[in-house]
Amino acid sequence: MRRKTAAITVVVIIIAALFAILLAGSSVRIQESWNPVYEIRLESNIRYVAISQDGKRILAVTHFLNTTVFVIQPYEETILKLKVTPYHWHDFTPETTSKDLRYIIEGSFIYEVSEKWVARLWYENKHVVPGHVAKFSSDGRFIVSGDSSGWVYLIGINGTEVWRRRVSSSSIDDVAISDDCRYVAATDGFFVYLLNSRDGNVLWERKISGESWQDGHLSFFSNTHLLCIGLSGYFPPLIGILDINGDWWLKQTKLTHHLIQIKTSKDLIFIADKEKVYVYNMRMEPLYTFEAKIKVNSFDCTPDGNCVVIGSEEMSVYLFEKGVKRQPTVKTLTLYNAKIITPPLKRVEWRLLWEKRMQEYVRYVVISPNAEYIVGSSYSKLIVLAKNGSKLWDADPPQIVDDIVPISVLDDGTCWITTLRGLDVVGIKEGKVICHVELKDLLGYFPSYGIEDVKISRDGKYILMSINGDGVRFYSLHNNKFYELWKWEPVGSATQAALSDDNSYVLISNGVVTLLRSNGSLVWERRLAGYITFIPFYMPHIFRKYQQHRSGCPRFGG
Amino acid sequence: MGVLDLEGKWVVKPFPLDAVFTFRRYGLSNGLSKDFLFIQDPLESNSNKVYVYDWNDQEIISEIVVKGKIRDLAATPDGKYLVVCDDLFRVYLFERRDACVS
C-alpha cells in the first residue's frame, strides 16, 4: 500500500513538474513583449510607415495639403522633412520601400529619397514598375512586380527588365522575393507560384484556395526560404507556411481577426487588421498585440522583428522595441521638440540695385549679356534703360502696328523685337530701325500668324526662326541680312529653338529634341518632351567635349 | 529640369523643380544662367517671388521678392544680374552677392 502511495506521489510530482515546465514555457512566451519607446507626432494623419533594417530610421508619409515624407531618426531626435515634388500634388501612398529606405514605389514609379527631396526616378518617361504590386529585393537592387494579367516581372532599380513570366490568367495579388534573391513568389489568390529569380522559370505551383474572392498575401521569412501565405477576403482569414519544395510547413490556420497586411521577420509573423497588429510565432501561437490609439494605417518591422513601427490614422507614429524588460518612459518626439532639417540652405543672395517706377506698364523685359542695357516693352513702345537705371531712349516704331515683344538686346545695345502675333522681326539701335523683316516677305503671302520662336545669336550675326502657321512649319537659319542659310522641316509642328553661344549648334524641340550642327546637319535626336535651351558658358567638363566637337564642325556659311 | 551633353547623354538627370516653368521663347537670355535657373512660380497667380535654383546642386538657393505680381524676368548668362518687371509698373535690377555658406 505504502509502495503504491509512493508511486502515486511520484507520478503526481512528475505531472506537477511537467505542468510547472509547461507553465514556465508559456510564461516565457507571455513575457515576449514589445514596449513603446517613442511616439512621434507629425502634422497630419500617417498614411504609410517603414523602418530601416537597423531600426534606427523611420520613414513616414503624411498627407494633408501637400504630401510630405519624414525621415525620422528617433534616437538622434532629428526629423528630416521632405517634399515630394513635383508630380504629386495629390495623394501619395507608397506601395513599398527598400530596406535602406532609399527607394519608394508609388503607383508605377520609383522615387528616390535624398537629403533634399523625394524625387521620381526618370527613365525616359517610362513607367518603370509594370505591375500594381511590387517588392524590393533585400539589397534594393531589384524589384519584383505582378500585374493584373497574371504576369510577374523582375526589374532592376534602373528600370531594366530582367525577365517577365506569365504564371496565371488572373490578377496577381502579391509577390515576394527571398532575402538571398534566389526565389520569387507570386500569388493570384488561388495558387502560389515559386519562380527561379535567375530566369523566371516556374519551379512549382501550390493550390491555396478554391474561392474566387480571396486575396493572397506573401512574405518570405528573413534569411530563410519559408514563405508565409495569408488569405483574406472571407472571414476567417487563413495563414499557412510553405517550404521551398511547396510542402506545407504549417498548414493553413484560421485567424480570429481580420487580415489587412502581413510582414514576417526571421521567425515571427506580424498581422495587421484595421485596429491592431498581432504577433504570432511560426506555429501561429499568439505572442503579443500592439494597439494604436486609433486606426492602424500602416506598419513595418525590422528583419529580426525587434523593432516595430506603426503609423496611425491620427498624427502619431509609434516605435516599439522588443525585449525591454522594464516599461520605459515613452518619449514623445514632435515637430516642436525635434531638430527639424528642412533643406535647402540659403547660400547666395541677389541685392536690389535699383527699382524704377515706369510711366508705362512694362510687360516684357530683357537684359544684355554684359548687363549694360535693359529693355522693357509696353504695348507698342520699347524702353531702353542703362545699367544704372537711367533711361537711354525709347521707340514707338511706326512700322509695327502690333504689340512689341523684345527678343534680345545685344552687348552693343541693338534691340531685336518681334510682335505678339509673330509677323515681324525688327532690329533697332538707338531708337532707329536698322532691320525690318516681315513674315509675308519670307512666305510670299500674308499670314495671320507665324513666328513661333526666334533667337538672335549673341554676336547678332545669325537669326534662328521657328515658323508655324497657315500650313507651313519649318525652322530656318538666316544671317543678319536675312539671307536664308538653311531650312529644316520637322515631322510635327515647329516650336522651340535655341542657338549655342558660339553659333556651332542649333537645338529644336517639338516632342523630339533634335541637335543640329550649324550647317543644318543632324547630330542626334531624342524623344523627349519639354522646353529646351543651351546653358550659357557650358560647365568645364562638358566644355572640353564641346571643344572637341567644335574642331570638326563647320561654322555658319562654312 | 535635366541637362544633356552634346552626345545626348544625361549630365544632370532630370530633377524636380518646385514650380512649373518654361524656357521662354525669343531672346538670348531667359531664366537660365551658367549656374542658376531663375523662375517664377506660375502656379501662384499672385506670386511676387522668384525662385533661384542652383541646377548643379539641384536645390533652391535663394528667393527674390518684388512688390507686385511678377510679369517677366531675365538674367544675364553669368547669373550676376537679374531684371524683373511687375504689375505695379516697376522694373527692378538685382545683383548677385555671394554670402557665406551656412
Image (cartoon, helix red, strand yellow):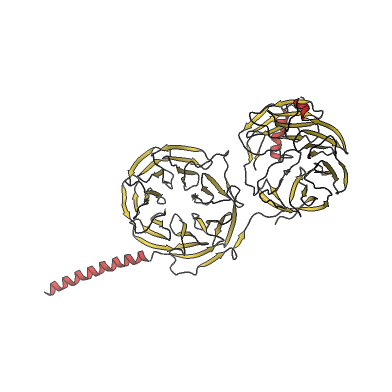
Q: Is A295 situated left or right of A362 in this image?
A: left
Task: Please identify the residue farthest to the left as the structure is shown.
Answer: A1
Q: How many marks?
A: 0
Task: Please identify the residue farthest to the bottom as the structure is shown.
Answer: A2
> Picture coordinates of residue A412 (x, y %)?
85, 38
Q: Is residue A264 visible?
A: no
Q: Is residue A69 above or below residue B23?
A: below
Q: Is B89 situated left or right of A206 in this image?
A: right
Closer to the camera, A145 or A35? A145
Rendered residue at 46%/40% (across/down): A154
> Picture coordinates of residue A496 (x, y %)?
69, 35
Closer to the camera, A541 or A165? A165
Q: Quadrant of residue A284?
A: bottom left
Rendered residue at 32%/65% (across/down): A26
**In the rendered view of the protein, which quadrant contains the C terminus of chain A?**
top right
Q: Is residue A178 visible?
A: yes
> Picture coordinates of residue A222 (x, y %)?
42, 51
> Picture coordinates of residue A277 (x, y %)?
42, 60
Closer to the camera, A23 or B37? B37
Q: Is residue A431 above or below residue A116?
A: above
Closer to the camera, A91 or A43? A91
Q: Is A74 situated left or right of A507 in this image?
A: left
**In the rendered view of the protein, which quadrant contains the N terminus of chain A?**
bottom left
